[in-house]
Amino acid sequence: MNPPIWEQEVEEFSAKKGLIICSDCGAVYWKKRWHHSLEKLNSGDTEKVSQKDTPTKFQICPACKMIKNKQYEGRIRIKNFPESNGQALEELVEGFGKRAYDRYPRDRVISINKKDGEWIITTTENQLANKLANKIETQFHNSKSKTHFGPDPSDVAEIVIE
């Protein structure tokens, strides 16, 4: 059995030598941070990294691991949302998720499910869920949200919007 996500994150902060490349999405872990790819990493102002010169390991990144294990850190439940605004909400969530992922490869909207008049949106990061809930509240003025964090050691944020 895999250790909980919070234990895996503790490992992440220890300095690891070389590169770790996600075998699912191609994200690259280098110098305590995940980057989208080796090409994007080398296009920045940092020193250039070569796979030939650097010890390289392939494994699944934390975001892909969470998705694979059907885990999440943020869940937004939207109740009583008018169907007439459904497409606007879906576009808002997808656009927000894409921009978050473009900034940092671990920030992802995992799923958007509509069931029995309720929307359930899951994210890989609880902060992403909070920011998305605030954006939904701002965009659709008649909504109010409540946030509940799971008991320690959990990082899960449950947000209900009505």
Image (cartoon, helix red, strand yellow):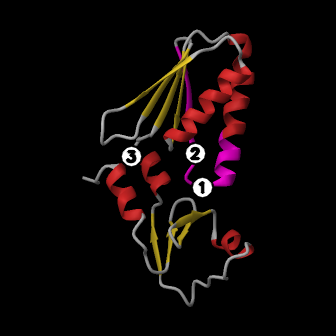
Residue 69's tag is: 3
On screen, 107 above or below 81?
Answer: below
First reached walking from the N terminus: tag 1 or tag 3: 3
Circle 1/circle 2 CB separation < 8 Å: yes
User: Circle 2 is placed at which residue position?
Assistant: 108
Of 31 and 111, the residue lying toward us: 31
Q: Residue at x 60, y 55 (%)?
A: 105
Residue 37 spot, x, y in % from top left: 63, 67
- Could you tell me the amino acid type at mark 2? Arg
Residue 105's tag is: 1
- Could you tell me the amino acid type at mark 1? Pro
Within-10-Å neighbours for mark 1: few <14, some 14–19, many 20+: many
On screen, 80 above or below 70?
Answer: above
Q: Which residues are magenta?
A: 97-115
Of 148 and 22, the residue lying toward us: 148
On screen, 66 above or below 19?
Answer: above
